[in-house]
Amino acid sequence: MGDSAARFIFLFLDGVGLGEARATNPLAAIAAMPFLTQLLDGPLLARRTACRAGLLLQPIDAILGVPGLPQSATGQTSLFTGCNAPAFMGRHLSAFANGSLRTLIEAHGMFKQVLSLGGSVTHANLYSPAYFEAIAKRRRRYSVGTLLTLTAGVPFRMGGGGECQTAISWDITGEYVNQRGGNVTPLTPAAAGHRLATIGSQHHLTLFECYLPDYAGHSQDKAQIIQVLRLVDAFVESVVAHLQPGVNLVISSDHGNIEDLSHPHHTANLVPLIVIGPQAIAFQPVQDITGITPKIVELLQVGSNTAPSLYHVL
């Protein structure tokens, strides 16, 4: 795959759905996400769409035909593999991937698919030795994104004592992590966004995962939620400002949560698919969260010499 091939930054925002314009929906407030509100000609709400050169916003389904509320493990697996993980499991699975989901990730992970095309992939999140030590001692479990990286043999961006100039903490700035005993070198949202754009210019596919919206949504603390939304908005603004030619920013989520303050649970709402960049309109056929990975692979495949499709429908 040549240097002229398209490049994609996949920004995963945990727990962001599209709700109605109600008092219980913090996304309805224009001040919550001023950059995205201006870019999309209005706040992130149900039924809002945008489709023009360089920009796409459309609501996509996260339930995938399986009864119940969408959950993190199956939702993220669906996003990062293109497979219908809830249908495979027969249910929505929360939190961490089990052995069955690991088989899907290992067989169909988007990193493996892009690597098979001869492309370059990376996970931009900062990891610490303590995280892997906790997993080894069974105090923690692998996240879907970690398994995606591990099973593809992609190096993790490790920080010794939090020092890593080429990675970003999952909370963007490091503030949330440090308040809970971490040791991450703080970044401003603007600096973190610039860093992600730089990383994204160097690889055909870059993943960054931010779990802040889901954490905030479960808290039902409106002040904290607005603060998180503004932080994410400033981060996205900086990524967009520093996007290099040919790089596309893809933003989506695994399920709704933060858009409904009336309860601390996930929602059945559609989730946003936002694409900013020269390939934005190509994502218009995507109707649910299983469609993102195959579309990225398809667009990268166009620029490769590999003839057969690497995506297999489950």
Image (cartoon, rainbow, N blue to C red):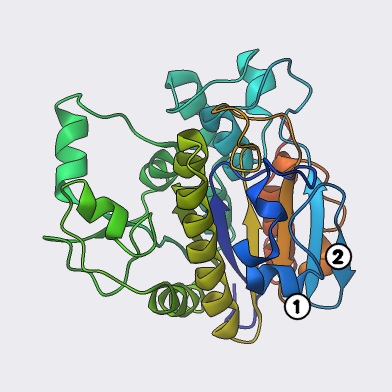
Tell which circle, 1 or 2, labels the residue nearer the N-terminal end. Answer: 2
User: Dividing the picture into quarters, in which one does residue 57 lie?
Assistant: bottom right
Between 189 and 193, the one lying in front of the other is: 189
Disc 2 secondary structure class? strand
Residue 280 % position (x, y): 78, 69
**The C terminus: image quadrant:** top right
**Residue kind at label 2, given as amino acid type:** Ala
Three-letter code, disc 1: Pro
Quadrant holding the N terminus: bottom right
Residue 278 is labelled as 1
Residue 225, image x and y in percent? 51, 50
- Residue 271 to residue 101: above or below: below
Position of residue 264 in the picture relative to residue 292 (left or right): left
Q: Residue at x 34, y 34 (%)?
A: 142
In the rendering, which numbered label is found on residue 50?
2
Residue 139: tell me if it is visible.
Answer: yes
Q: Is residue 249 above or below residue 135?
A: below
Q: Residues within 10 Å of mark 1 (few under 14, many from 20)?
A: some
Residue visible at 61% across and 39% down in the picture: 254
